[in-house]
Image: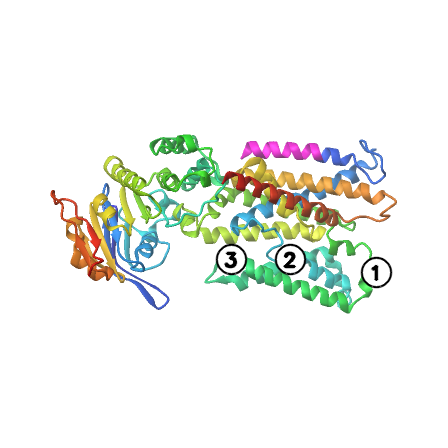
Amino acid sequence: MLLEAKNLDFAYGRHPVLSGVSIELTAGEVLALLGPNGSGKSTLLRVLLGQLGASGSICWDGRQIGQWTRRELARTVGYLPQTPAADPEQRVAEVLQTGRAPYWGAFGIESPRDLEVVHQVAGQLGLAEFLDRPIAELSGGQQQRVYIGRCLVQEPKALLLDEPSTFLDLRHQVELTRLMRSLSRQQGIGVLLASHDLNLAATCADRLVLLHEGKVVANGPPSAVVEPQLLSRVYGVPMRQVETASGRVPLVYPDLAS
Amino acid sequence: MLASLAGATLVWAIVAAGCVCVGSTGRVGWPGVEVLPYRIEIVLVASLIGAALAAAGVVYQAILRNPLADPYLLGVSSGASLLSLLWYLGALSALSLPIQAAGQQAFAFLGALASVAVVFLLSSRRRRIEPVTLILVGVIVNAVNGSLYLLIFFRHPELVSRGGGGFTFLVGGIQSNLTRQQEWLAAACVGIGWIVLACLSGQLNVATLSEGEAQGLGVRIHRLRWIGLTTASIVSASVVAISGPIGFVGLVCPHLSRLIVGRDQRRLLPAATALGAALLAVADAISRVLSQQSLLKTQLPVGVLTGLLGGPFFLLLLWQTRRRSEGAM
């Protein structure tokens, strides 16, 4: 088991954000975290990384979170926040290189392996031709790929992505989905993504976890979680399910008529 | 990093050698044996000050995530000026002899560190410091220090008429009353501090990102902020103690170096350090030349020069970057 977290409780001051959340992630699995704004998705990701202190137990790769140093954890888990803060004039190569920070020696001295990994990831994500360009000159979709690339340069076993598809158009969303699936299938990386997009999550994830007011209200395969009645209750909007001839893809849409 | 360190040192050495040839006598050329040690000393002191301010500027800008940050933002210069004014006033020196013996430099150093300590104390919450809070508190502490300074100054109009060597401090200029010991002490502080900063320079690349990203990349960001800012403050305080607040070097050099070597802090730190050293050595040489013109008749503090040249130069830089970024859109 890559990640095993049990009974997490967290509060900002007096406002409880997470209560009794348990979540697991296995290697090679894509797990999507769903829930309305304020349901605790982003907070949960930061709690899992040990950035916010919560009560409960968090185990990465069989070791309690307290036994990891930040540097070690950064070699195992890559994290992409909702809005990455890069210097707009930074070149793509430099952004990717910072992903090797957990491997640098003193004085930030790089090993040949560090440069090798950067080039390998750049090739894998089709970023090789952009390496010398400032990141601000790239399109939103390309920028997102650079940031995911920075996570991959960490050579992680798990990826925690906070709403990676928010600013992407349809084509880039599909590309992102393919990328996440190939990372999990071919490299055995466990991907945990927080998402607002129910249908995207349902099509790309192996398993969905639905958060509502800081509690897990559903956990299972897309066919079990993408269920109009449950989602209507959680999102407070009447929902309908698409019925396709094949019936295999669980899709929902808000029912504006009622 | 080693390559940029070597290159930067070479550039500085050439410039410094040139500066050694410029004297206050009006003659340009390699100085005679009797003048040489003195000339080398003044060039080295100027270089030390420039190097320290530029290095501190790089670290402040990275950790505070603000391109306008300079080494004086968190109170170093205003604290140093305030306490050295107190010393200069003689109000304290009349009280006891040891204080007078401690010297203006020691007072300035303590004032700088005390001022930064107050800023840290007021802006830390649960032993954490946030860039935005730091900057705001720094501005406030600077303003209070400045007001106290003015208050004392106006209460004692005789200060201006007395003038003299110590007064150069208040404007920012290399002191003529430095002892060899003080110079070595400052050099040691800057040297050790610089090595610490160089050791952190890789992590500084990550400090410019958001807190969560930095932590996600394995950097203990809060610890980095404490160590980085404290070290940079000590480095700048130890040169402000011997020179007073010399302006613009700590702000301009990081920006200028960024245009040359890019934004990687591991290359930026050595480059900016050498550039600061070279720039202040040149500025000091110019002020030596200007001082011997009949027009000025007096020693021109180098702080006046860097302010006069640095201000417009920085504006130029700003316009240029803006034009470039507009062109990119």
Judging from the image, mark 3 belongs to the subunit labelled B
Of the pair B325 and B53, the residue shown nearer to us = B325
User: Viewed as shown, does residue A56 lie left or right of B279?
Assistant: left
* Residue at 55% across, 60% down: B136
Q: CA distance from mark 1 to mark 3?
A: 41 Å
Between circles 2 and 1, the one closer to the viewer is: 1
User: What amino acid type should be assigned to the residue bearing mark 3?
Assistant: Val
Residue B253 point in image, percent of width and height: 62, 43
Q: CA distance from mark 2 to mark 1?
A: 25 Å
Q: Which residue is mark 3?
A: B132
User: Viewed as shown, does residue A37 lie left or right of B18?
Assistant: left
Q: Which residue is mark 2?
A: B112
User: Viewed as shown, does residue A83 lie left or right of B11?
Assistant: left
Q: Which residue is mark 1?
A: B162
Q: Which residues are magenta?
A: B1-15
Q: Are marks 3 and 2 in contact (CB under 8 Å)?
A: no
Q: Is residue A25 magenta?
A: no
User: What amino acid type should be assigned to the residue bearing mark 1?
Assistant: Arg
Check chain identity for marks 2 and 1: say if they share one: yes
